Image (spheres, rainbow, N blue to C red):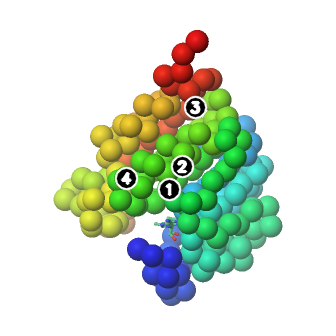
Amino acid sequence: MRAEDWDARYAGSQQWSEGPNALVAGLLAGLPPGEAVDLAAGEGRHALWLAGLGWQVTAVDFSATGLARGRARPGADRVRWVTADVLTWAAPEGSLDLVLVAYLHLPQVDTTGLLRRAVGWLRPGGRLLVLGHDADNVAHGVGGPQDPAILHSVERLAPVAALLEVDRLEQVRRETPAGTALDTLLWGRAPARPVGARG
Ligand SMILES: C[S@@+](CC[C@H](N)C(=O)[O-])C[C@H]1O[C@@H](n2cnc3c(N)ncnc32)[C@H](O)[C@@H]1O
């Protein structure tokens, strides 16, 4: 979907819950606050929640209408809101403690390229959290985009995981009112020196 399509969707009504996804909250709640980027932040549910915990958060999305919903929420002044295409936007190398990418679905070549760049933005020990619909969700889950080509899987995220010290790379179940949805989770840390570096 293009930015205009997302703007139209956000203009209609609020799309996502106000609070964070439960798995995202469970993984991040115990971390010491630092500098974070929420890529494809949408209405900013995760950026706002992280800012409330003391994180310095930049929320990036190409839908100005989605970000405007976040900007209107309490605590929004603690978040830096950036309207930009995540495929061209960049953070300084080695500057972040966390990159969060929740439910961003792009063609695989774009996803892999974006996440490879995002790993480079992390400080040693900085965290990458990727969560989104799994390709199996189309046949065996509920909701979400129905084009398997843009969905995640353990295999598709493996090239990015290879750059990290991985804590979790797996398919996870998410209970919804409509039934069980299948997501893919990648949760890892940037190594002290890049994987594959010598000397
Ligand atoms: C399903 S929503 C998820 C929003 C948010 N991460 C969340 O979990 O609530 C997907 C978001 O990706 C954004 N998006 C899609 N492609 C993008 C791109 N190339 N650059 C920036 N944002 C993009 C859309 O505007 C939309 O807000």
Q: CA distance from mark 3 to mark 1?
A: 18 Å
The percent coordinates of residue 77 (x first, y second) are: 80, 67
Quarter of the C terminus within the rendering: top right
Mark 1 CB within 8 Å of ligand 1? yes
Closest to the observer, 93 or 50: 93
| In-image side of 112 versus 62 (left or right) | left
Most extreme residue toward the top is 199
Q: Amino acid at mark 1?
A: Ala
Determine crowd level at label 2: few under 14, some 14-19, many 20+ residues with C-alpha closer than 10 A: some
Name the residue beneath numbered marker 4.
Answer: 109
The percent coordinates of residue 107 (x first, y second) are: 35, 59
Task: Tell me which residue sits at (56%, 27%) in the image.
Answer: 194
Which structural element holds mark 1? strand
Name the residue beneath numbered marker 3.
Answer: 190
Residues at badges 1 and 2 in contact (C-beta under 8 Å)?
A: yes
Of marks 2 and 3, which one's residue comes earlier in the chain? 2
Which tag is nearer the camera, tag 3 or tag 1?
3
Name the residue beneath numbered marker 2.
Answer: 24
Q: CA distance from mark 1 to mark 2?
A: 8 Å
Name the residue beneath numbered marker 1.
Answer: 102
Q: CA distance from mark 1 to mark 4?
A: 17 Å
Mark 4 CB within 8 Å of ligand 1? no
Which structural element holds mark 2? helix
Q: Amino acid at mark 4?
A: Val
User: Is residue 181 something that shows in the picture?
Assistant: no
Which structural element holds mark 4? helix
Which tag is nearer the camera, tag 2 or tag 3?
3
Which tag is nearer the camera, tag 4 or tag 3?
4
